Image (cartoon, coloured by chain):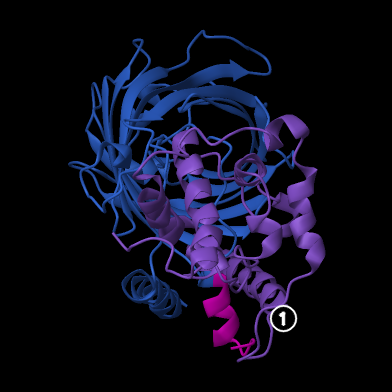
Chain colours: A purple, B blue
Amino acid sequence: MKAAAAALAVSASFLAVSVVLAQTRSSDKPPVGAAPKYDPAIYAELQKAPEKARNRANPLQNDADAVAAGAILFEQHCAECHGDAAQGGKKGPNLRAVEVQGATPGAIFWILTNGVVRKGMPVWSKLPEPQRWQLVRYIKSLGEAARVGESPAPKP
Amino acid sequence: MALFCRLALHGFFSFFVFLVLYLPPARAQEQPYFVAYDHYLEEPGSLEIEYFSTFGTQRGGNNFHAYWAEFEYGATAWWTTEFYLDGQTTFHDSTEFTGFRWENRFRLLKHEHFINPVLYVEYENKNGADKILKEGEGHDVESDFLVSNAEARKEHIHEVELKLILSSTFKGWNFTENTLAAKNLSNSPWEFGYALGASRPLALKASAKRCTFCPQNFVGGVEMFGGLGDRHNFGLHDTSHYLAPVLAWNLPSGWTLRVSPGFGLNDNSHQFLMRWGVSREITGFGSMVSRLFGGHK
């Protein structure tokens, strides 16, 4: 009986910690209807990529399926924070922003691999390297699509 | 008090059934390990609900079925906290609730490196009938499990467990090494153990179509774990060791299924362990709780 009571006490504290952390994050959210605004410094993380990483070319740049596969991966792993259309969401910045679209594929890959752990972006190296390059290809395709005024990738 | 606890536990269970059924799942990319840990933590704000089962053979006694539920929450990108409830059924004996565990994992470095350290700190409040075999430690051997549940549950164990997790990812493979030190808070010496794991998805590129049976949804590997004695008698003498192939199937619906047949490597080990598990990751749990308690919509 003591164990069950202790289990409940721990559950309650677990829940309380969740609430505190969740409220801390949600207090950063903009009012309903307003476009999410982000500190431009958040994009500065892209500049922290070492030169060697920045200069890496995407080995799947010419892979015909990379954008479609990247779109599925984005929906599964990234949309929760960055929004369904990568326009920015509850926690993650707009990936259609010029700072991201102007970054090299290597810099985006570096961010995916290393995360921005102190600012809430997890490490995504658990996705195999080819999948991270597929994601990079999809993210960069958003900028290409904007330039020609069409939707980036057909929903598979 | 008994009625209160029963109602509270039912409420707790119902709450999580609600979460599993009604909150949006995330497509998990889970490793297949049951014992070893890698350096990947839960995404911030996500809750993973897991159920695991271990069937074990017992020479000279009754086989058993041990099970545990895990609630794993990504508090931040560098901290994951996890709560366990353990139980077991020993055939021809009884069914026991054996205790709970509270585990925390902290990522120590902010960037990805060739070897990535994670610090693991766990508190266990369990009784001597616990049989989930979630780790190998000290001089734990098969004959310890011969004691009847009625006798074993009289032993109360308050234990702190520390692990240093060193994990690498190389060309799609994950290699992990866990070193364990555990201390029963009663007058017992520090005990030690280890776990090793290697795993790889069956395909590294994702398919351009949604699919259930695509090879990238399967992660296969192997893990090995066992005890390393205690402070007074460190080494392999009177310790048990296991080798277990592992397989995880990450379904597009957000569910992950895992299976692992384990084999004892010496006479002190159970000859055979059959493990399986099912889990589901729920995104936005933190935000949902925030709204529940009047946070921003």
Instruction: Give coordinates of residue B128: x percent, y percent.
Output: 45, 40
Front-most of residues A62 and B257: A62
Chain under numbered label 1: A
Q: Is residue A38 rendered to the left or right of residue B73?
A: right
Instruction: Give coordinates of residue B204: x percent, y percent.
Output: 38, 33
Q: Quick check: can you spot residue A82?
A: yes
Residue A37 belongs to magenta span = no
Among all residues in the image, which is located at the extreme front?
Answer: A148
Question: Mark 1, residues whose alpha carbon is within 10 Å: few (<14), some, or many (≥20)?
Answer: few
The local secondary structure at tag 1 comes to: loop
Q: On the image, numbered disc 1 is attached to which residue?
A: A27
The residue drawn where x is 63% and y is 39% is A106
Residue B292 belongs to magenta span = yes
Front-most of residues A155 and A145: A145
Q: Is residue B187 rendered to the left or right of residue A63?
A: right
Relative height, residue A107 to residue A28 (above, below)? above
Relative height, residue A35 to residue B150 (above, below)? below
The residue drawn where x is 50% and y is 41% is A133
Q: In which quarter of the image is the C terminus of chain B?
A: bottom right
Q: Is residue B46 rendered to the left or right of residue A41?
A: left
Instruction: Give coordinates of residue B226: x percent, y percent.
Output: 47, 20
Residues shaded magenta: B286-297
Which amino acid type is marked by label 1? Ser
The residue drawn where x is 39% and y is 74% is B23
The residue drawn where x is 68% and y is 50% is A103
Relative height, residue A106 to residue A5 (above, below)? above
Front-most of residues B60 and A142: A142
Q: Quick check: can you spot residue B87?
A: no
The quadrant where residue B143 appears: top left
Instruction: Give coordinates of residue B261: x percent, y percent.
Output: 26, 28
